[in-house]
């Protein structure tokens, strides 16, 4: 991922220094376990820990000749460890190192993403309670539907990211497995206790059956979870982008002093952050299908998955980390305009209360079909010519013979639509 969309802590997980450190720890912990079994001398294991070093430039130099990254690392390590290096990598295969390392890196990345989601949840909760009773129009198909509150909108997004957190936790647990099982995963040349020891030291669990590689359904589930989180990011971003449109302007991204919106038009205040989030969500979701396609392997293993993961693992996690951080900032500083929300709600002259009128007429004895036609006829007149929906209903004999003035007036009460907001808030923020 390019630096523009990278945050340092997540980016470091995928840098060569972290990767080679994990490689070394796997090899050194395996040596400890082998020494415990008497397979290698205890002194050899101690020497590996004491003298073990590596240089990225030297590893790259060796790999240009060997065309094998793990062998290049082991060769460079041996240059520091000396003769005892012959006991390193005993009974192991390259995938033991690569797959276990990827598990550690994905676990590290998941920890940061969980922290990111927590920060976003905190921002959403704060703003949801702030605007719990801020009346606005709810829309379906982009068209005015019925009144809601802006806090209720945000509570819905909070609930989505709370679910996302659970999925991330499950994905982290599923992908955090260790494979130190040797060629084709039979443990023929290395005892399963070595795997158990390495797994414990790295905070992993032994893979149930590793066929020389860790099964890629685990990784498919991990990247699918990231894709769903990205979908929720875009869902909220698109909502803000719509609300910032000039014709709507109910909420907008914070616009800092000195910020410029356009090189040509000085008046512009564009939703650039949330547009950026839509783009980043596409990048994260783009990793899902390749990860799912990696599940299919030739027999015990092939290498088709490797090139895919070297691209999607850093790109998807770095992009999602950046997106979640940016979204938390957008929500925290979001500029909300209650007056514009109320003005938009009133724009259709009360049509948003049409369902209440429909139901009241049926309760008063009119058939649903006749009630619907009556209400729609008056509503279409407002659509076409403007004016007050309530006034038109007052002039409709079919309505007034069923509903008196007071009954009609009560149907246009905004509080009716917000009476259960606290119930929903309790479900979302205090489910116990």
Image (spheres, helix red, strand yellow):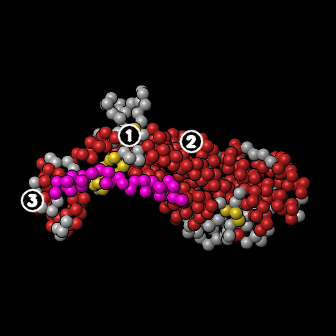
Horizontal side, residue 53 vs residue 318: left or right: right
Q: Please say if 347 is above or below 313.
A: above
Q: Which percent across, then down, holds residue 274?
A: 41, 44
> Tag 1, which secondary structure?
strand
Q: Residues within 10 Å of mark 2 (few under 14, many from 20)?
A: some
> Tag 2, which secondary structure?
loop
Q: Who is closer to the viewer here, 158 or 387?
A: 387
The residue located at (24%, 55%) in the rendering is 411
The chief SS type of the magenta part is: helix
* The magenta segment: 404-432
Q: Are marks 3 and 1 in contact (CB under 8 Å)?
A: no
Q: Alpha carbon of mark 3 to alpha carbon of mark 1: how far? A: 42 Å
Q: Viewer-nearest of labels 2 and 3? A: 3
**The magenta stretch spans residue 328:** no
Label 2 belongs to which residue? 7
Q: Residues within 10 Å of mark 1 (few under 14, many from 20)?
A: many
Taking the view exactly as shown, the residue that stands out farthest to the top is: 258
Q: Which percent across, then down, holds residue 135?
A: 34, 46
Of callouts 2 and 3, which one flags the residue occurring earlier in the amino acid sequence?
A: 2
In this orientation, does residue 303 appear?
Answer: no
Label 3 belongs to which residue? 397
> Tag 3, which secondary structure?
helix
**The magenta stretch spans residue 410:** yes
The residue located at (34%, 44%) in the rendering is 243
Label 1 belongs to which residue? 336
Q: Which percent across, then down, holds residue 117?
A: 54, 50
Q: Please say if 418 is above or below 367.
A: above
Of callouts 3 and 1, which one flags the residue occurring earlier in the amino acid sequence?
A: 1
Q: Who is closer to the viewer here, 364 or 290?
A: 364
> Looking at the figure, which quarter contains the C terminus?
bottom right
Horizontal side, residue 106 vs residue 255: left or right: right
Q: Viewer-nearest of labels 1 and 2? A: 1
């Amino acid at each position: 991922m390019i630096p523009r969309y990278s945050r340092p802590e997540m980016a470091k997980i995928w840098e060569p220094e972290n990767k080679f450190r994990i490689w070394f720890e796997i090899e050194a912990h395996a040596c400890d376990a082998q020494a415990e079994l008497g397979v290698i001398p205890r002194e050899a294991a101690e020497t590996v820990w004491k003298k073990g070093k590596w240089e990225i430039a030297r590893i790259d130099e060796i790999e240009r000749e060997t065309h094998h990254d793990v062998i290049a690392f082991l060769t460079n390590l041996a240059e520091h460890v000396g003769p005892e290096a012959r006991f390193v990598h005993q009974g192991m295969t390259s995938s033991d190192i690569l797959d276990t390392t990827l598990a550690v890196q994905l676990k590290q990345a998941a920890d940061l993403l969980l922290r990111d989601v927590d920060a976003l949840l905190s921002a959403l909760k704060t703003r949801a309670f702030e605007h719990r009773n801020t009346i606005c129009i709810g829309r379906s198909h982009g068209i005015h539907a019925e009144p809601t509150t802006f806090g209720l909108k945000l509570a819905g997004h909070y609930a989505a990211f709370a679910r996302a957190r659970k999925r991330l936790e499950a994905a982290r647990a599923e992908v955090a497995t260790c494979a130190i099982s040797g060629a084709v995963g039979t443990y023929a040349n290395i005892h399963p206790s070595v795997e158990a020891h390495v797994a414990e030291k790295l905070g992993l669990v032994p893979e149930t059956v590793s066929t020389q590689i860790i099964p890629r359904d685990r990784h498919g589930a991990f990247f699918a979870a990231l894709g769903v989180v990205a979908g929720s990011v875009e869902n909220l971003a698109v909502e803000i982008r719509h609300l910032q449109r000039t014709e709507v302007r109910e909420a907008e991204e914070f616009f800092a002093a000195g910020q410029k919106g356009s090189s040509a038009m000085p008046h512009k205040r564009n939703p650039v952050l949330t547009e950026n989030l839509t783009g980043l969500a596409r990048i994260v979701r783009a990793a899902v299908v390749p990860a799912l396609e990696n599940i299919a392997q030739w027999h015990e293993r092939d290498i088709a998955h490797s090139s895919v993961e070297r691209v999607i693992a850093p790109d998807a996690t770095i992009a999602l980390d950046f997106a979640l951080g940016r979204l938390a900032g957008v929500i925290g500083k979001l500029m909300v305009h209650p007056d514009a929300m109320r003005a938009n709600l009133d724009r259709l002259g009360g049509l948003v209360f049409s369902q209440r009128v429909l139901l009241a007429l049926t309760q008063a004895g009119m058939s649903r079909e006749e009630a619907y036609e009556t209400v729609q006829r008056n509503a279409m007149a407002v659509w076409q010519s403007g004016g007050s929906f309530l006034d038109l209903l007052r002039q409709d004999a079919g309505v007034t013979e069923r509903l008196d003035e007071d009954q009609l007036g009560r149907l246009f009460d905004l509080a009716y639509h917000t009476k259960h907001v606290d119930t929903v808030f309790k479900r979302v923020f205090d489910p116990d």
